[in-house]
Image (cartoon, rainbow, N blue to C red):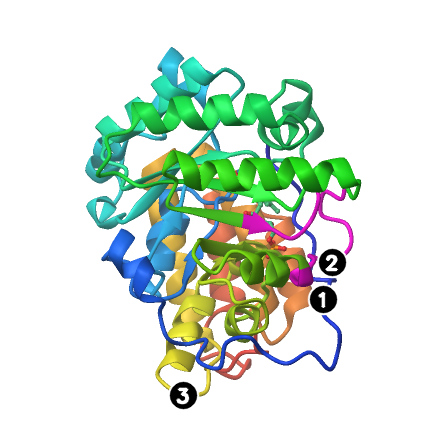
């Protein structure tokens, strides 16, 4: 299910002379606190298959992220037990990962095909102590759609509703549920109708919010996220909590999305891979300060912490592979990003990894202790 992450290349679609719909984007909508009191800021770390594990979530939290989503957890893997279950087991993670018990509030996201197995998987996540259960009706990966999961449901509203109904019934009323959507399966009129049906029914069934990615399923990650779609959606549904996703690359983008579309919270996805500082910077903006790029010392500390967490969660072999791809993303903040990226690409084991840190993240070396910005 892992998807390739490319460098930011898109800007969201908005007419240049459009005026904001929210004048106070840094102020949290009171309805969010009513649903999830621990969420004290209008942004969260998205579900990111192959990335948003406990290590990445804990780092995000240390930098001020108030809520994190797991990667999409396949219902069958949860039900079959084994590794798929273990990686979702918050009790296990609390025992094995340093500070793992701090991984709250957390949204457990399920993906699957059949209402009954999705419902059973949701029950497992509830028993593990997840604070919110999210249903993925958005994933555009071909392999997933072929198995009638994720974004497939946006073209099949009655099946989507059956899943949403079964999951909501399986989750105790005091635990909120949410849905991840894209703005449609494609740009057809039929797709717009299907989206509206699923969107409205989710709230009727008792879902607390939807997170809407402003791309269609057929668009995958090509082209911009349609923020005008989000704006019109919120305009039509001022009574509903709608969170936005798509083309959020910086802390400024978080508040720009809220101001220009009216969504009440923003999902930070590719913009936070190798960039936990985006959450600290968002907090700085909320406090009326300029967002500060990470110094080289901070970058080194986070790289070391991430490696330690990753090692505890996945063991040395997997940690080496994972940290290579994270390192590539972290290198964007380094004053000589291309050189450092190449060094991370060549990493095959923990010793290689430490060598990159010693060679390029030593604040006392010739490279100045400042960042190239983020
Ligand atoms: C590598 C990758 C993995 C993703 N995995 C998930 C996932 O497991 N669950 C989910 O809801 N969205 C997933 N997404 C979608 C993101 O959460 C987000 O909606 C999308 O990337 C758009 O936001 P962006 O343009 O700001 O990155 C994934 C995206 C990427 C690039």
Q: Are marks 3 and 1 in contact (CB under 8 Å)?
A: no
Ligand 1 has an atom within 8 Å of the beta carbon of the residue at disc 3: no
Residue lying at 42% horizontally and 25% vertically, measured from the top left: 165
Which x, y percent locates residue 292?
Answer: 46, 82
On the image, which quarter does residue 4 sit in? top right
Question: Is residue 273 or residue 306 the one in the foreground?
Answer: 273
Q: Quadrant of the C terminus?
A: bottom right
Secondary structure mostly taken by the magenta-highlighted segment of the chain: loop
Q: CA distance from mark 3 to mark 2?
A: 29 Å
Identify the element where label 2 is drawn.
loop
Q: Earlier in the sequence, mark 1 or mark 2?
A: 1
Q: Earlier in the sequence, mark 3 or mark 2?
A: 2
Identify the element where label 1 is drawn.
loop
Which x, y percent locates residue 234?
Answer: 54, 59
Residue lying at 63% horizontally and 20% vertically, measured from the top left: 148
Q: Residue 201, relative to residue 325: is it above or below?
A: above
Mark drawn on residue 224 = 2
Q: CA distance from mark 3 to mark 1?
A: 25 Å
Residue lying at 39% horizontally and 87% vertically, measured from the top left: 288
Q: Does residue 38 appear to the left or right of 297 in the view shown?
A: left
Q: Residue 246, relative to residue 71: is it above or below?
A: below
Mark drawn on residue 289 = 3
Q: Which residues are magenta?
A: 212-228
Q: Are marks 1 and 2 in contact (CB under 8 Å)?
A: yes
10 Å neighbourhood of mark 2: few (<14), some, or many (≥20)? some
10 Å neighbourhood of mark 1: few (<14), some, or many (≥20)? some
Residue lying at 63% horizontally and 81% vertically, measured from the top left: 19
Q: Earlier in the sequence, mark 3 or mark 1?
A: 1
Question: Is residue 227 or residue 39 the one in the foreground?
Answer: 227
Question: Is residue 262 or residue 135 the one in the foreground?
Answer: 262
Residue 85 visible, this angle? yes
Residue on which the image places disc 1: 11
């Amino acid at each position: 299910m892992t998807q390739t992450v490319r460098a930011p290349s898109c800007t969201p679609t908005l007419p240049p002379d459009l005026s904001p719909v929210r004048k106070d984007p840094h102020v949290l909508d009171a309805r969010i606190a009513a649903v999830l009191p621990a969420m004290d800021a209008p942004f969260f770390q998205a579900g990111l298959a192959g990335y948003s594990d406990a290590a990445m979530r804990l780092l995000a939290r240390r930098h001020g992220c108030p809520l994190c989503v797991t990667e999409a957890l396949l219902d069958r893997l949860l039900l079959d037990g084994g590794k798929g279950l273990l990686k979702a087991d918050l009790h296990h993670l609390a025992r094995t990962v340093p500070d793992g018990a701090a991984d709250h509030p957390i949204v457990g996201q399920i993906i699957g095909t059949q209402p009954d197995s999705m419902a059973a998987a949701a029950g497992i996540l509830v028993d593990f102590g997840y604070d919110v259960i999210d249903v993925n009706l958005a994933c555009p990966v071909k392999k997933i759609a072929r198995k009638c999961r994720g974004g497939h449901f946006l073209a099949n509203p009655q099946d989507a509703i059956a899943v949403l109904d079964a999951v909501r019934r399986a989750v105790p009323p005091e635990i909120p549920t949410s849905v991840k959507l894209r703005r449609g399966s494609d740009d057809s009129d039929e797709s717009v109708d299907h989206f509206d049906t699923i969107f409205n029914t989710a709230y009727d069934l008792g879902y607390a919010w939807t997170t809407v990615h402003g791309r269609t399923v057929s668009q995958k990650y090509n082209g911009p996220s349609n923020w005008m779609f989000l704006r019109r959606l919120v305009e039509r549904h001022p009574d509903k909590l709608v969170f936005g996703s798509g083309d959020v690359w910086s802390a400024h983008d978080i508040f720009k999305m809220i101001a220009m579309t009216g969504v009440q919270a923003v999902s930070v996805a590719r913009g936070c891979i190798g960039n936990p500082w985006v959450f600290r910077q968002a907090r700085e903006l909320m406090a009326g300060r300029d967002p500060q790029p990470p110094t080289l010392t901070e970058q080194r500390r986070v790289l070391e912490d991430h490696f330690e967490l990753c090692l505890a969660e996945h063991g040395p072999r997997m940690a080496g592979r994972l940290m290579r791809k994270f390192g590539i993303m972290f290198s964007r903040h380094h004053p000589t990003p291309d050189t450092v990226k190449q060094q991370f690409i060549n990493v095959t084991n923990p010793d290689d990894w430490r060598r990159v840190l010693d060679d390029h993240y030593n604040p006392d070396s010739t490279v100045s202790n400042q960042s190239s910005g983020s």
